[in-house]
């Protein structure tokens, strides 16, 4: 009897001290998943979104300034013609200031530096230079996207026809880049605003080349702006697809890592249960049965009783019941694991549905 009591106490102490290793480091792995893996999966999504936003923002800036440049260059040509014709003093053409006051009176203030035609023309030159510089500064990044090839070709390659006049009837035609033509227009406008002989400037055929090519230049200005709009349309669509693809990849990464973790924990738990089973299997079956009976009887007692109770979790009690019989330890695994399997199935279905929705939205 004494020996049996000693065995009981020994087995009880063993049961109380049993802690499955996977239950010990399992929470640590879960924390690592939340602290490391989830941010690692989110960072690429964030980077992709921010990067695409930057590209779209730059493209939108070019769209805005290219449209503004088209109108501003047309205004530059008009101001050059008006300034030269007015400053000659040989025409009845009123000044820009007079035209504005006759049209709007005191209802609208005079535009900046429109006190004279020459100052208004120089202000237009400065505005066009600023627009061209902004577009040039952004064109490199736009070229890397591969969506603005047509518009950039118009801007930087010799594709725009232009006629250079040497007399009112004689000219030579060639193809030039839009940037070259804009530089020519700005140079001619500067000369027109700073000339000290407006009458003699009428014999300047750079001036007449500007005026006579207006029908050719304006459609190309408009085409450049239109192709930029088409480019940003394609860029926006591609950016949306890239972001959605990155989100899908992140979801798959989280799913695969979580699934691998669950499978790893299940395998480890099964191996550890088999090891515990092999240890307790060597003990007398009667001793295990007596301990289980004693634990069951103690479980029903009132918590205020003075005797010390052996606290046993449902998992440990179930393990002892399994170990106290000759049933194979792997039996009933499916019944015990069905909640985990159900969660995996639900998570898989949810992931598949989300991926399908994202792909549908992308295309």
Image (spheres, grey):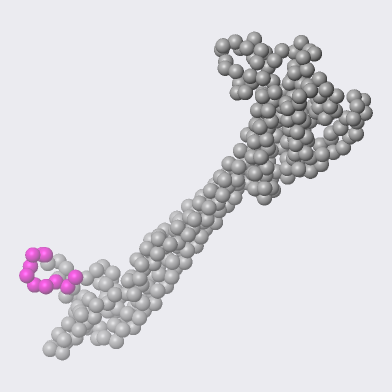
On screen, residue 4 above or below 234? below
Residue 317, horizontal then vertical, whole percent: 25, 72
Give the residue furthest to the bottom. 3
Residue 153, horizontal then vertical, whole percent: 76, 43
Counting every numbered tag in the picture gives 0
Instruction: Determine whether, in the image, residue 246 is placed left or right of residue 17.
Output: right
On screen, residue 355 above or below 339? above
Residue 324, horizontal then vertical, whole percent: 27, 79
Give the residue furthest to the left. 306
Is residue 176 something that shows in the picture?
yes
On screen, residue 208 above or below 334? above
| Boundaries of the magenta span | 302-311
The residue sitting at 75% across, 13% down in the picture is: 93
Residue closest to the eye, 6 or 52: 52
For residue 170, which quarter of the picture? top right
The residue sitting at 45% across, 55% down in the picture is: 346
Residue 328, horizontal then vertical, whole percent: 36, 78
The residue sitting at 81% across, 41% down in the picture is: 158
């Amino acid at each position: 009897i004494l020996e049996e009591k000693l065995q009981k106490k020994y087995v009880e102490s063993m049961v109380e001290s049993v802690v499955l290793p996977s239950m010990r480091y399992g929470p640590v792995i879960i924390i690592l998943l939340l602290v490391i893996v989830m941010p690692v999966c989110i960072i690429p999504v964030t980077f992709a979104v921010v990067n695409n936003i930057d590209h779209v923002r730059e493209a939108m800036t070019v769209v805005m300034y290219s449209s503004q440049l088209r109108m501003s260059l047309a205004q530059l040509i008009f101001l050059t013609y008006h300034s030269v014709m007015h400053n000659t003093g040989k025409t009845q053409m009123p000044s820009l200031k007079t035209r504005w006051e006759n049209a709007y009176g005191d209802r609208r203030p005079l535009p900046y530096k429109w006190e004279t035609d020459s100052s208004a023309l120089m202000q237009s030159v400065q505005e066009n230079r600023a627009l061209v510089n902004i577009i040039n500064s952004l064109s490199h990044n736009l070229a890397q996207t591969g969506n603005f090839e047509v518009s950039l070709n118009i801007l930087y390659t010799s594709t725009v026809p232009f006629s250079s006049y040497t007399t009112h009837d004689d000219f030579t035609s060639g193809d030039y880049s839009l940037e070259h033509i804009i530089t020519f227009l700005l140079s001619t406008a500067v000369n027109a605003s700073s000339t000290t002989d407006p009458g003699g400037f009428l014999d300047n055929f750079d001036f007449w080349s500007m005026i006579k090519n207006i029908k050719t230049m304006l459609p190309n200005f408009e085409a450049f702006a239109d192709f930029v709009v088409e480019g940003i349309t394609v860029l926006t669509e591609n950016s949306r697809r890239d972001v959605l693809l990155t989100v899908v990849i992140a979801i798959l990464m989280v799913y695969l890592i979580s699934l691998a973790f669950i499978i790893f924990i299940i395998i480890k738990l099964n191996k550890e249960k088999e090891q515990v089973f092999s240890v307790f299997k060597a003990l007398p079956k009667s001793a295990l049965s007596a301990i289980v009976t004693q634990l069951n009887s103690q479980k029903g007692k009132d918590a205020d009783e003075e005797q010390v109770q052996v606290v046993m979790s449902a998992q440990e009690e179930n393990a002892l019941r399994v170990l106290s019989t000759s049933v194979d330890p792997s039996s009933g695994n499916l019944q015990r694991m069905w909640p985990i399997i159900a969660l995996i199935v639900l998570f898989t279905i949810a992931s598949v549905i989300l991926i399908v929705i994202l792909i549908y939205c992308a295309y």
